[in-house]
Amino acid sequence: MGKDTLEIAINGIKLILIFLMMVQAVPILVWLERRGSAFIQNRFGPNRVGPLGLVQLLADAVKFITKEDFAPDKAVRSLFYAAPVFALIPATLAYAAIPMSTPIAVAAFEAFGSTWGPYLFRVQGYEIGVGVVFILGVSSLAAYTILMAGWGSGSKFSLLGALRASAQVISYELALGLSIVGVIMMYGTFNLTEMVQLQEGPLSFTAFGYTVASTVDWIPNWGIFYQPIGFILFFSAAFAESNRLPFDLAEGEAELVAGFHTEYGGFKMLMFFIGEYGHMMIAAGLATTFFFGGYGIPGITVAELQAAIVGWGFSEQGASYMSALIHFLSYNVKFGLFLWIFIHVRWTLPRFRYDQLMDLGWKTMLPWALANTIVTAVVIYVATA
Amino acid sequence: MTSAASSMPIGGIIFLTIFIAIFGTFLIFLARAIGGQRKDNSQAKRDIYECGIPEEVKKETKVSIKFYLTAILFILFDIEIIFMYPWAISFREFIATGMGTPVLISMAVFIGIFIYGLWWEVKSRALEWD
């Protein structure tokens, strides 16, 4: 009984923590985006409130929450209020399935007069066997929140923005889904943790009966070396999925005022922001997991690192915690770099025209993703048969 | 395949969904309680955005049929892509058991139909935005 209670309690707390972590990351990203854009455009950006303007985020949150809550007369009130709440759900559900570090083996321990555990603590919300399919399916539910917001606002700018946004999101969903087929073929699994484990160690693969292995340790066995085109397609499509520049036709200030959230203000607007940044985080996390070895560190495997930590005089249990912490940092370095690329691209490239956007999705990226799939299949067949 | 390959934590997913829904609703009510209501409640404020002129939106705003067409094409192609997933995941296993050739050929036929569909779609100008 003790074991079940412990597992349920730990998992519940862990899920809440992951959600709060995502929500907390958004102000930091907004600060990074504003300072970064200022840096790129040779301005100062917010630098008055607190050191480096870091307290600006808190001031913004206070400002948002003291705004009058307001819905226009024409709005469908139920949809209008439900949309920002639903905007939070798909991003968080999908992000909770991404593994962020090695599992920690917690030994059985005594507390409150009974024995708890042993227990395997995973540094991810939940492990899902069909992780890839789950994340793709759940994160594309975001199209519904966009449509709810657009239709619920009762404004034609919102409706047009929502239709554009959902048409764009579903169009790039095809290229996104197809660019991963090559990855799945390489790894032969949908489980993200297994994918990360397969990318462990130095580069080595078997082709035509010969085993090709890297002579140096530090070249990792990452997916990027097997699927470079898949990575480019995946990452570009992820920009479109999260409605970021150069694909932010959903907002298109010059044409549509502010797109689907024209009528929103205050805290409801902020919740759409959290959803958008959440999608950025999913894209960054997935790119890390599929193509850059997830939480892995180049040059050293999980087992080697744990053995080294034990060698420094830690217990097995302590080594498990330490290695989880180190791998968590490694994951976050890669994750942060991808988030920075998102921000850098936004302030570097101009926006597309809508027909160019659709042409790129359907007539360029979809055929390339198909070609990538075919070539991968043929190469795997020829090299291993 | 390990036992983890078939795990699906329904409980965790439902718990997280309910938690976020409650959290979001709470935030909206909190903002409503703190933000309060201003005295000004004129018609101009309650109108939707319309570039400074009186609002003219009718309830049944008409939108381009292109969006509908895009959605239908998306469903067709997305289902085709989802069909490739189970094939992709077991392709290497099939090769290992010597079944590689028939599996590759059957997928080549499927992708051929996919490409024909895409070509036909481009040719019939279903993807043109003017």
Image (cartoon, grey):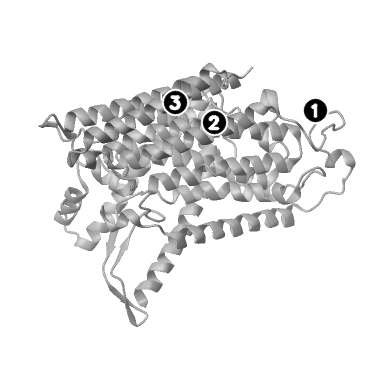
* Chain of residue at mark 2: B
Asked if residue B98 can be seen in this view, the reply is: yes
Judged from the image, the secondary structure of the residue bearing numbered disc 3 is helix
Q: CA distance from mark 1 to mark 2?
A: 35 Å
Assign a secondary structure to mark 2: helix
Give the amino acid at mark 1.
Answer: Cys
Quarter occupied by the C terminus of chain A: top left
* Circle 1/circle 3 CB separation < 8 Å: no
The percent position of residue B107, horizontal first and vertical second, equals: 33, 32
Label 1: which residue? B51
Residue A4, quarter of picture? bottom left
Marked residue chain, label 3: A
Q: Position of residue B78 (x, y in %)?
A: 48, 36
Give the spatial CA distance, label 3 vs label 2: 13 Å
Q: Residue A296 falls in which quadrant of the image? A: top left
Q: Closer to the observer: label 1 or label 3?
A: 3
Q: Is residue B82 left or right of residue A49?
A: left
Q: Between A63 and A10, which is closer to the camera in this rendering? A: A10
User: Residue drawn 69% across and 31% down?
Assistant: A160
Horizontal placement of A155 versus A308: left or right?
Answer: right
Q: CA distance from mark 1 to mark 3?
A: 38 Å
Q: Nearer the viewer, mark 1 or mark 2?
A: 2
The kind of residue on which mark 2 rests is: Leu
Q: Chain of mark 1?
A: B
User: Are the residues under badges 3 and 2 in a single subunit?
Assistant: no
Instruction: In this rendered view, identify the residue nearer to me: B99 or B1.
Output: B99
Q: Earlier in the sequence, mark 1 or mark 2?
A: 1
Which residue is denoted by mark 2 in the rendering? B73
Q: What amino acid does circle 3 point to?
A: Leu
Image mark for residue A366: 3
